[in-house]
Image (spheres, rainbow, N blue to C red):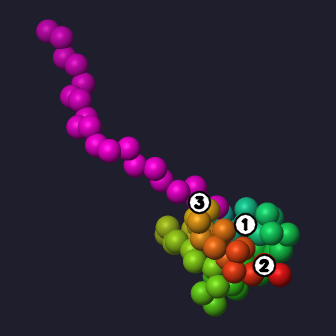
Amino acid sequence: MNKSKPKMPRTPSLKLPHLLSVSELAEYLGVSTKTISRRIQRGEIRAHRFGQLLRISDEDALAYIGAHRR
């Protein structure tokens, strides 16, 4: 008897955003993780919480960078 795995239904391809950690964004911007955390708390940087982890999407990071250019 040949048992094959059931096929998953085809769904449109879903592209998930790349998510940065607080430390990754801090390193990229050349600031401390505390600075990034404060800006998240003030609502300057949009972040997503997964349990105790905070993640920032590329899109949100770029929006913050674009809004704070000099």
Question: Could you say which quadrant of the image residue 13 lies in?
Answer: top left
Residue, disc 1:
25
Q: Can you name the residue that lies furthest to the top here?
A: 1
Residue, disc 3:
19
Magenta run includes residue 36: no
Quadrant placement of the N terminus:
top left
Q: Vertically, is 15 above or below 66?
A: above
Q: Is residue 2 left or right of residue 45?
A: left
Q: Residue at x 23, y 29 (%)?
A: 7
- Distance from the alpha carbon under mark 2 to that under mark 3: 22 Å
Label 2 vs label 3, nearer the camera: 2
Label 2 vs label 1, nearer the camera: 2
- Look at label 2 and name its amino acid: Arg
Question: Could you say which quadrant of the image residue 70 lies in?
Answer: bottom right
Which comes sooner in the sequence, label 2 or label 1?
1
Magenta run includes residue 19: yes
**Residue 15: image location, x then y, percent:** 46, 50
